Image: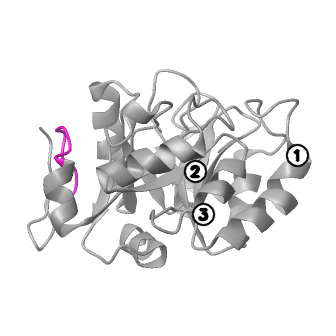
Amino acid sequence: MTTHTNSQDIQRIRFEKPDLDAMTQDFTVVDLHFHSCHSDGSNSIDEIAERAGQLNIGIAVTDHNEIAGALELDRYREILSIPGIEITSREGAHVLVYFYDIDSLQRFYEQDIQPFMGPNVMSATLLAMEEIVERARGYRCLVIFPHPNCAVYTGICNPYFSEDRQQQLFARADGVEVINSGNLKKQNLKCALLGFNLNKAITGGSDGHRVNHMGAVVSYADCPPDRVTFLEAVRK
């Protein structure tokens, strides 16, 4: 296990199976990376909401280049949902954007992403990564690079992005995803090291595509179960 503690001695990264029953007693717990049938996931929003309720956790449906699932999930008031989207840049790398309110997500998608979509939802957009980040910066949101080190080129730490270019993008983002359940542990360790070196926000998510993946990796904060408060905790 690799861990880091803050001044309250809370471990920032824990490489172990989440004990959701115990964690939800003291923290707000959210799986920040999940896919529905609106992109490449297997489950409906009804099924996703039901499973999140069973686990007593919040959920961010971050479909690829699509927000229909996030909009539908927002109607489930009993579930803490974080409005989000995973966008594929022109280079093929992914970026997660989380919004403090659902209307901002919808405006961002309709004005800044949808006009530049590829032939299908899983295709790369026409936007370079820098342009996606700059467009997102016009909204109240968090910009997070998911699985920055991974086996394929969907992470930003790949040869398409020079070291200088990566550093410029990291400077404009809010942080990185440091644990992704689809990654090998050695890749997640590299992501964790990157997160600590950047000294920015760190997140974890299952990147789940079926409801049985939900909660395999979570982010947690000592705050009320409210999306604005939770995102502020992540930012800090």
User: Residue 51 at what x, y percent from top left?
Assistant: 40, 45
User: Residue 70 at what x, y percent from top left?
Assistant: 63, 54
Q: Is residue 67 visible?
A: no
Q: Are marks 1 and 3 in contact (CB under 8 Å)?
A: no
- Taken as a whole, is the magenta stretch helix, strand or loop? loop
User: Residue 45 at what x, y percent from top left?
Assistant: 58, 46
Q: In 3D space, how far apart are the residues under numbered discs 1 and 3 (Cα atoms)? A: 25 Å
- The structure residue drawn at horizontal position 40% and vertical position 39%, both measured from the top left corner, is 206
Label 2 crowd (10 A; few <14 / some 14-19 / many >=20): many
Q: Type of residue at label 2?
A: Leu
- Is 131 on the left-hand or right-hand side of 234? right
- Is 194 on the left-hand or right-hand side of 185? right
The type of colouring in the image is one colour
Q: Is residue 210 above or below residue 226?
A: above
Residue 226 image-quadrant placement: bottom left
- The structure residue drawn at horizontal position 62% and vertical position 73%, both measured from the top left corner, is 101
- The structure residue drawn at horizontal position 38% and vertical position 28%, both measured from the top left corner, is 183
Q: Type of residue at label 1?
A: Phe
Q: Tell me the number on the disc at residue 74.
A: 3
- Residues 139 and 103: in front is 103
Ranked by sequence position, the earlier of labels 2 and 3 is: 3
The residue identified by callout 2 is 96
Q: Which residues are magenta?
A: 12-19
Label 1 crowd (10 A; few <14 / some 14-19 / many >=20): some
The residue identified by callout 1 is 116
Q: Secondary structure at mark 2?
A: strand
